Image (cartoon, grey):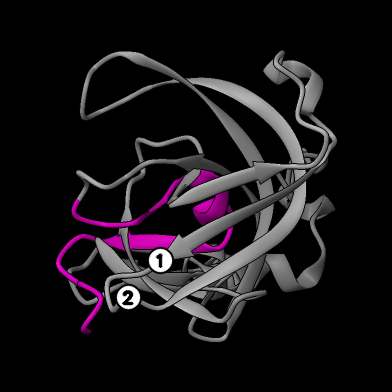
Amino acid sequence: MILAGFRRLQDMPPIVRRPGWAVFLALPLLVYCQQDARGQTVTKQERDKLVIGATADITEVSSGIVFPARVDTGAKSCSLHVEKIEIDDESPDPLENVGKPIRFQVKNHNGDSAWIKTEIVGRVRIRSAATNKFDRRYKVALNLQWKDFQKVVSVTLNDRTDMAYPLLIGRNFLRGDFLVDVEKDRND
């Protein structure tokens, strides 16, 4: 690409005519790409991403409650277990509730509980992994934190009583910031 405009060796700059010029021109590529411990090529963007395991401890920032979470790259968005939901001036038509204030109670595996107040940002139709049927769920924007990293993402509110993890972390939290190492878990 750099040499595309040159037709003859005499037209090339003196630095290119010297032996070893290819190494000089390839240096930026070597800095950009390196090999990991298994000999696989890793780009600079991949090196800068955080590595999260198949499970993780995630904090919902406004309540400070920590949830054990399952990381699911097949899930489009995050999903949180809720105990109770209260919507201000609730309409019988769920679509009319979008944009209204909502208050919902969450509880983690240790029994820590809190009420979170926010606004409904949407309503979605999702196929439940537990029942293989479609459910309609409200979506809210929540600030989630893993270690020192925080991100505001859309989270569906769901009854996850029968699930092993009260929080599911989907691609909307992972995208652009994480690589998933399935050999790691929340205790690593």
Q: Where is residue 185, by image quadrant?
A: bottom left
Give the residue at mark 2: 111
| Residue 12 visible in the picture | yes
Q: Where is residue 167, by image quadrant?
A: bottom left
Q: Position of residue 112 (x, y in %)?
A: 40, 78
Give the residue at mark 1: 107
Residue 69: in magenta span: no
Q: Which residues are magenta?
A: 164-188
Q: Inspect the image, locate mark 1, and give the three-letter code of the amino acid beneath it.
A: Lys
The N terminus - image quarter: top right
Look at 79% across and 54% down and name the residue there: 10
Residue 162 sits above or below residue 166 on the image: above
Q: Inspect the image, locate mark 2, and give the three-letter code of the amino acid beneath it.
A: Gly
Q: 48 or 182: nearer the eye? A: 182
Look at 21% across and 67% down and name the residue there: 39
Q: 131 or 54: nearer the eye? A: 131
| Residue 20 visible in the picture | no
- Find out whether the residues at labels 2 and 1 contact each other: C-beta distance under 8 Å: yes
Q: Position of residue 123 (x, y in %)?
A: 65, 25
Which secondary structure lies at badge 1?
strand
Q: Where is residue 154, by image quadrant?
A: top right
